Image: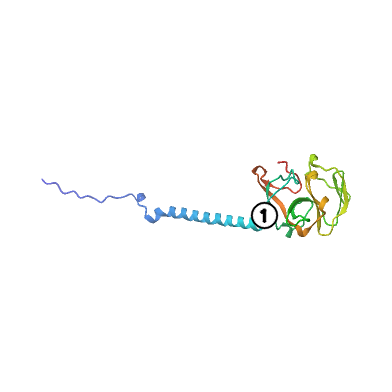
């Protein structure tokens, strides 16, 4: 007796294994979009940082030890070139300016006396309009115990001095500095790496 011919039924695939090609490529497409967005944002951030550095800040190299211990010889710092367009120069600011006796050279010093004030130094202590000025940024070993003045600071001029008083060519020698020659304030040290950080305008960095 012949057996009836068996018919093969089509194989059924579980719904979970049937993933359309479009759905399989969706995660990859999303990942590519995210990478593209992150790359775009990173390039924009780098561009803005470069604009800020180029137009607002200027890298300079310190030469000499007149601002020790805050700044050392050959140290690299950034100066803010536009800060004084928006705020006044203040006592304690560490400023960069064209040397009054040779405008091809730049100096960096700390502002001690403001326009119209009378500056006097008695045995190393600085007096402004008869009142002593606290100077925690000048270590005892860097003090100059000589006398100077009194001298009155001219209008739109500033009396500047180095923190390393016994080794500084400053307003005690070349006089006060006109505001038109002051073109930046020291704000940040970036080299060497162990000096990396913000530059305080009021306290010495003991680095």
Q: Which corner quadrant holds the C terminus?
A: top right
Give the residue at x 52% y 54%.
39
- Total marks shown come to 1
Rendered position, 146 above or below 82: above
Q: Residue 185 location in percent, x, y?
A: 72, 53
| Colour scheme | rainbow
| Circle 1 Cα neighbour tier, 10 Å, few/some/many (<14 / 14–19 / ≥20) | some
Q: Residue 52 location in percent, x, y?
A: 64, 57
Q: Residue 150 location in percent, x, y?
A: 89, 51
Rendered position, 193 above or below 118: above
Give the residue at x 81% y 57%.
157
Q: Residue 115 location in percent, x, y?
A: 83, 57
The quarter holding residue 196 reads top right
Image check: 35 left or right of 6? right
User: Depth check: 86 or 50 in front?
Assistant: 50
Q: Which corner quadrant holds the N terminus?
A: top left
Q: Which residue is mark 1?
A: 58
User: Depth check: 36 or 11 in front?
Assistant: 36
SS category of the residue bearing label 1: strand
């Amino acid at each position: 007796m012949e057996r009836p011919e068996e018919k093969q039924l089509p194989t059924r695939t579980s719904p979970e294994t049937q993933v359309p090609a479009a759905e399989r490529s969706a995660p990859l497409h999303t990942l590519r979009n995210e990478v593209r967005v992150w790359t775009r944002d990173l390039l924009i951030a780098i561009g803005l940082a470069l604009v800020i550095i180029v137009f607002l800040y200027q890298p300079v190299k310190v030469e000499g030890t007149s601002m020790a211990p805050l700044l050392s010889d050959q140290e690299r710092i950034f100066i803010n070139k536009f800060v004084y367009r928006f705020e006044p120069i203040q006592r304690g600011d560490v400023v960069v300016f064209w040397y009054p006796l040779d405008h091809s050279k730049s100096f960096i010093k700390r502002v001690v006396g403001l326009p119209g004030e009378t500056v006097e130094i008695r045995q190393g202590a600085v007096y402004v309009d008869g009142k002593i000025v606290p100077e925690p940024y000048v270590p005892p070993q860097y003090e100059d115990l000589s006398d100077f003045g009194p001298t009155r600071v001219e209008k739109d001029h500033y009396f500047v001095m180095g923190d390393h008083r016994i080794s500084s060519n400053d307003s005690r020698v070349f006089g006060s500095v006109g505001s038109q020659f002051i073109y930046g304030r020291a704000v940040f040290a970036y080299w060497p790496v162990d000096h990396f950080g913000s530059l305080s305008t009021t306290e010495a960095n003991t680095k």
